[in-house]
Image: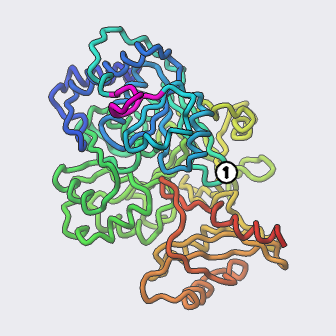
Amino acid sequence: MPGSPFGSFNEIISAHARHRPRQRAIVSAEGIQTWQAFEARTRRVSQSMLEAELQPGDRVALLMVNGAAMAEVIVACLRAGLIAVPLNPTVTQSSLAAMIADAGARVVIVSNEYRDRLDEAVAVHRILAGGDALGWVSYSSWQESSSDRPLPPVSPESACNIIYSSGTTGRPKGIVHSHRARLDWAYDIAVALRFSPGARTLMTIGLYSNISWAGILATLLVGGTLFIHQGFDPERVLETVERERITNMAVVPILCARLIESETWSRTDKSSLIGLMSCGATLPVLVKQRLMAELPAGVIELYGLTEGIATTLEPDDAEGRISSVGRPITGSTVAILDEDGNLLTEGVGEVIGRSRYVMDGYWNLPELTSEAIWIDEQGLPWLRTGDVGRIDSDGFLSIVDRKKDMIISGGQNIYPADIEAVLASHPLVADCAVIGVPDEVWGETPLALVVLREGAEGAAVQAWANERLGRRERLARIEVREELPRNANGKIVKKDLRQPYWAEAAAT
């Protein structure tokens, strides 16, 4: 199987600086960097890190706003053989402290906007900040370093990053990838998502997310240009797509919905956008159909785990299987496992997968790493996804639900995603989630939490949905909410929704 022609990220950056020195590498609020400038700046930061007595394999935590500086630090870590630990700034103070401590970070690089969050969280760590505040080391001094210290060779098998899971179903876990896995992943993602040497990639999701890393590494691999926004604003996104002739962009489903609901969506020239990818959660069918119909190149839905497998549904394959998440990309394979640990040729079961870019494991969690792996009769390891799905005769995967989200009512399995798909097809339902709540008769029963558009009534939506649901799936009640809790990747945090209902039942 072919892979990246490069042996290291160092070689990639150096090659682009030689062959396309004046081409733009980064466009952000901080300005424009050519490939020549980007190579020089990331080399200087790498050298400064090593001058600061960091050793290859040390962890460098990043708590930074989207921008050129964060992209520089990520790449500098890769070039110096340091392990990048990008952190989600939206988590609680206790979660932030726990992740930094768990990673054993020797350094935390912080944007000024987040400096106050670290007073308690990282009091024992050496801190390097994005500014010149008293008692802090300025990141700008690293960028301007004159060190000529050579960068050490980086083993392909050494750890590249620790990316913490979203924590939608429990404690965040640090997912470790090797340099070899990340290079192979970048190559396969670039092929699957239509990246070319002229790629112009728009980044609007936090650069701490694995979704963003897909865009970063694929663009770096092909020598394209990263356009980095500090956040997601649909009007600015569409203006940038048209003005800069953006070719690639990664979004989550809730952002897809915001784009097509924008007042400027219909009059924006989107013809350059050949690689719009939606991932992080299931893309609602109605949104997917609109994107397929209204974008010249359609939308590519990607299903995958940070741990390391991926499938894509290509626009040409969507007709007749719009609810599928497609087939494995190059380098991945998927299968279905029943509850007794047998591979299924048909039917519903847990989705498992293999790939050449699967994680090395969970940081400091050997038992959970073992639990995430299933060994087949040939002794080959497969990653257990925790998702329930089926594969049709043509090899297309459909996700039924999260295994942990499945509702068992009266001994029968109920998949919330099936009910959510019906609710989401109602034109007055803006958002929805179905969870299992305690029931004295059935053990648990499905409850729908919905965000309604103006003019809708919960009782009418419930009656409409129940006419279309199976007998076991019918909703006893609907609760209307102003909004539903989502993590930074757009996934609804169902554990937060379930917690008060089960806590109340336990107290009675």
Q: How many marks?
A: 1
Q: Which residues are magenta?
A: 127-139
Tell me if residue 374 comes above or below residue 484 in the rendering. Answer: above
Q: In percent of the image, x 53 and y 40: which residue is there?
A: 332
Q: Residue furthest top?
A: 149
Judged left or right of residue 10, residue 423 is right
Q: In percent of the image, x 43 and y 63: which residue is there?
A: 254
| Magenta highlight on residue 137 | yes
x, y percent for residue 424: 50, 75
x, y percent for residue 282: 51, 61
Q: Secondary structure at mark 1?
A: loop
x, y percent for residue 498: 68, 66
Tell me if residue 218 comes above or below residue 327 in the rendering. Answer: above
Tell me if residue 372 comes above or below residue 140 in the rendering. Answer: below
| Magenta highlight on residue 12 | no
Tell me if residue 421 comes above or below residue 324 in the rendering. Answer: below
x, y percent for residue 124: 57, 28
Closer-to-camera residue (487/242): 487
